[in-house]
Image: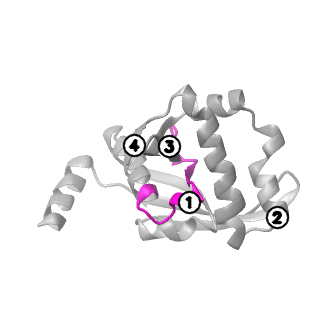
Amino acid sequence: MLIRPYAYADATPTLKVFFRAIELTARAHYSKAQRAAWADRAGRTIPTWHVARSAADTWVAEVEGRVVGFADLDASGTIDMLFVDPDFARRGIAAALLARPLSTARARGLTRVRTNASDTACPFFLAHGFRIEEQRTVVVRGVSMSHTALVLDLEPEAEAEAEAEADAE
């Protein structure tokens, strides 16, 4: 697996990952109407998608040359998106992607990272040390949906590296 910075050529494959993850992975937690509102297929074009991905630090995961996931971090320290293609779920790709925004946030001197996690993604973030700030119901394109505001307090990068080395011993 290769994790690398997002480029314009990744717009189409990352948008496909986004749609597939919402349609297939989120099926267990969200109705068809909720998934359709969330995906907003009609409102997401390649140019607007690229602008949104470029507005934040965005990374993609590749397996054998295929884009299978992506994650981002905006200037405020919010992870807006972290999605993995359902065919590649439970292979450590999301964890590998999550490491990039966290290390970038530490390098920027941020002490906290936030995300608004879907009901599908919430257990993943909790397993990686995030804590719940608030459970919310939002209206997306006229459809009510639930998500959870999560936060992770960051250790400085040097402390995180020392802790990782100690865990490896």
Give x and y (percent) for residue 105.
39, 43
Q: Which residue is mark 2?
A: 32
Q: Is residue 94 magenta?
A: no
Give x and y (percent) for residue 23.
72, 59
Answer with mark 3 or mark 1, whichever residue precedes in sequence: 3
Amino acid type at image mark 1: Asp
Answer with mark 1 or mark 2, whichever residue precedes in sequence: 2
Vertical placement of residue 164 versus 157, above or below: below
Indicate which disc residue 87 carries. 1
Q: Which residues are magenta?
A: 70-93
Amino acid type at image mark 4: Ile
Indicate which disc residue 66 carries. 3
Distance between the alpha carbons at the discs numbered 3 and 1? 12 Å
Distance between the alpha carbons at the discs numbered 4 and 3? 11 Å
Determine whether label 4 and label 3 are within 8 Å by CB.
no
The foreground one among 63 and 121 is 63
Secondary element under disc 4, as helix, strand or loop, is: strand
The foreground one among 51 and 132 is 51
Give x and y (percent) for residue 141.
85, 51
Q: Residue at x 37, y 41 (%)?
A: 104
Secondary element under disc 1, as helix, strand or loop, is: helix
Distance between the alpha carbons at the discs numbered 2 and 3? 27 Å
Distance between the alpha carbons at the discs numbered 4 and 2? 31 Å
Q: Residue at x 79, y 47 (%)?
A: 40
Amino acid type at image mark 2: Lys
Distance between the alpha carbons at the discs numbered 4 and 1? 17 Å
Q: Kindly report which numbered mark, 2 or 3, lies closer to the viewer in this rendering.
A: 3
Secondary element under disc 2, as helix, strand or loop, is: helix
Vertical placement of residue 147 versus 79, above or below: below
Indicate which disc residue 3 carries. 4
Secondary element under disc 3, as helix, strand or loop, is: strand
Amino acid type at image mark 3: Arg
